[in-house]
């Protein structure tokens, strides 16, 4: 079996996909997957499903959802009904023998970082691209409401952006500057407070013989950060700006920052 939570929730087995039509059941399974390998209490599930204002029969409803989920997972391939087990303090989601896209994502990120640190940039880029391909969209179609799922969705978005940064760094280290200019222009527009994307864009523009545009990116970042946060650009961005002004030879070295 395979569980996928990096986007709309999906369960599949032997090429066949299984869908949950009830949103509360979907959220229950998602909450159990986020806490896979640890006990999730009934109180935590109630908070995920209804927040601070649960209905009077919330506990009974949780029992129903779990019963239905067990039947759903048995139909999907958990024939021994071992995926969700009841413990004295709550419920345990077991992934023994199953694939999980979150685990695959973490593994690809670890692999990519290890290759990056070793200077194996092609292998790093392949790992980062594999990690990015696992993220299919917002978690649960952007509808998580409970604290655990909300935190998980925020983690996924932060990790996606970090993976994008690392992927761009690998391409820069491989000398593939021009191919990331369009992507970085889009990323600085979409995430105007993320200074690392400005830094990368300035560097690739400079290395593409577009010094004036690189300096223009800095001025744009400076305006945005002053207007939105009342802050000046971070130290590394200021250093890069000065290096571009003086055409510092260090900017031609791999991974300049």
Image: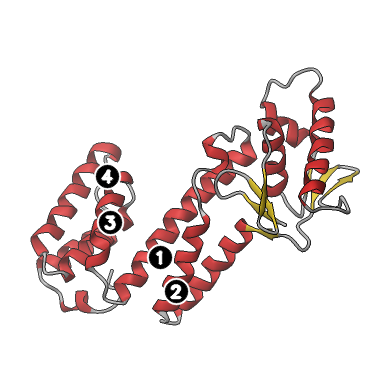
Label 3 crowd (10 A; few <14 / some 14-19 / many >=20)? many
Whole-percent x and y of residue 158?
47, 51
Q: Look at the numbered disc 2 and give the secondary structure of its residue.
A: helix
Judged by depth in the image, the label closer to the viewer, 1 or 2, is 2
First reached walking from the N terminus: tag 1 or tag 4: 1
Mark 3 highlights which residue?
Answer: 184
- Whether residue 197 sits left or right of residue 214 in the image: it is right
- Whether residue 24 sits left or right of residue 175 in the image: it is right
First reached walking from the N terminus: tag 3 or tag 1: 1
Outermost residue, top direction?
56
Alpha carbon separation for disc pair 3 and 1: 12 Å
Q: Look at the numbered disc 4 and give the secondary structure of its residue.
A: loop
The label on residue 124 is: 2
Label 1 crowd (10 A; few <14 / some 14-19 / many >=20)? many
CB under 8 Å between discs 1 and 2 = yes
The label on residue 231 is: 4
First reached walking from the N terminus: tag 4 or tag 2: 2
First reached walking from the N terminus: tag 4 or tag 3: 3
Judged by depth in the image, the label closer to the viewer, 1 or 4, is 1
Mark 1 highlights which residue?
Answer: 166
First reached walking from the N terminus: tag 2 or tag 3: 2
Judged by depth in the image, the label closer to the viewer, 4 or 3, is 3
């Amino acid at each position: 079996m395979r569980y996928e939570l990096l986007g709309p929730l999906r369960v599949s087995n032997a090429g066949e996909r299984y869908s949950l039509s009830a949103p509360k059941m979907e959220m229950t399974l998602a909450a159990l997957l986020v806490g896979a390998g640890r006990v999730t209490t009934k109180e935590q599930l109630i908070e995920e499903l209804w927040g601070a204002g649960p209905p009077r029969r919330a506990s009974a409803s949780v029992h129903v959802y779990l019963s239905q989920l067990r039947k759903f997972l048995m139909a999907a391939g958990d024939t021994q009904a071992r995926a969700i087990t009841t413990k004295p303090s709550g419920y345990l989601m077991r992934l023994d023998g199953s694939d999980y896209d979150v685990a695959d994502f973490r593994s690809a990120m670890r692999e990519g970082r290890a290759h990056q640190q070793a200077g194996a940039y092609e292998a790093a880029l392949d790992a980062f691209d594999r990690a990015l391909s696992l993220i299919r969209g917002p978690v649960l179609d952007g509808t998580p409401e409970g604290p655990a799922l909300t935190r998980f969705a925020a983690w996924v978005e932060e990790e996606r952006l970090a993976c994008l940064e690392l992927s761009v760094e690998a391409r820069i280290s491989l000398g593939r500057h021009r191919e990331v200019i369009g992507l970085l222009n889009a990323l600085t527009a979409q995430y105007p407070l993320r200074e690392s994307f400005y830094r990368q864009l300035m560097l690739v523009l400079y290395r593409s013989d577009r010094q004036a545009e690189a300096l223009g990116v800095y001025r744009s970042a400076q305006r945005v950060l002053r207007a939105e946060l009342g802050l000046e650009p971070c130290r590394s961005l200021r250093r890069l700006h000065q290096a571009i002004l003086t055409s510092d030879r260090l900017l031609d070295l791999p991974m300049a920052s």
